[in-house]
Image: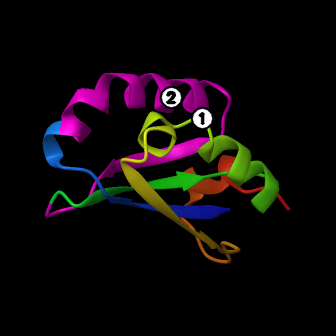
Amino acid sequence: MFILTLTYTAPIEVIDELIPAHRVYLDENYALGKFICSGAQIPRTGGIIICNAANKTEVTEIISHDPFYTQGAANYQVTEFTPTKYADEFKPFIKF
């Protein structure tokens, strides 16, 4: 599992213009079962995505389709982790 931390590198006006395309990207990855949750950081300097990918190579491929990334509007930091404790409702997302 991965935590994707986005940091905006473009003015917020550019980010706002890209939001509709970014939401399509999010919806596509939710439909594929790759994204578990996502949202804006507070203050609004970027975002967080919890990603359920097989490996970092897959994460890199997923990121490469984000309009924020392709338009140079955000950088991604990728943190891999193994969930060892979680709520029962989270269990369907855990792959061993």
The quadrant in which the C terminus is found is bottom right
- By secondary structure, the bulk of the magenta-drawn segment is best described as helix
Badge nearest the viewer, 2 or 1: 1
Q: In percent of the image, x 43 and y 47: which residue is there?
A: 72
**Label 2 Cα crowd, 10 Å radius (few <14 / some 14-19 / many 20+):** some
Q: Position of residue 38 (x, y in %)?
A: 40, 47
Q: Position of residue 17 (x, y in %)?
A: 23, 28
What is the tally of numbered marks visible in this picture?
2
Q: Position of residue 66 (x, y in %)?
A: 51, 37
The quadrant in which the N terminus is found is bottom right
**Label 1 Cα crowd, 10 Å radius (few <14 / some 14-19 / many 20+):** few
- In the rendered structure, the answer to whether residue 22 lies left or right of residue 33 reads left
Which contiguous range is marked in magenta? 14-43
Q: Give the labeled residue for mark 2.
A: 25
Q: In percent of the image, x 30 and y 57: which residue is there?
A: 46
Residue 62 to residue 76: above or below: above
Which mark is on residue 65? 1
Mark 2 in CB contact with mark 1 (< 8 angstroms): yes
Q: Position of residue 6 (x, y in %)?
A: 41, 59
Q: Amino acid at mark 2?
A: Tyr
Q: Amino acid at mark 1?
A: His
Element on which disc 2 rests: helix
Viewer-proximal residue, 72 or 66? 72
Q: In percent of the image, x 36 and y 47: which residue is there?
A: 73
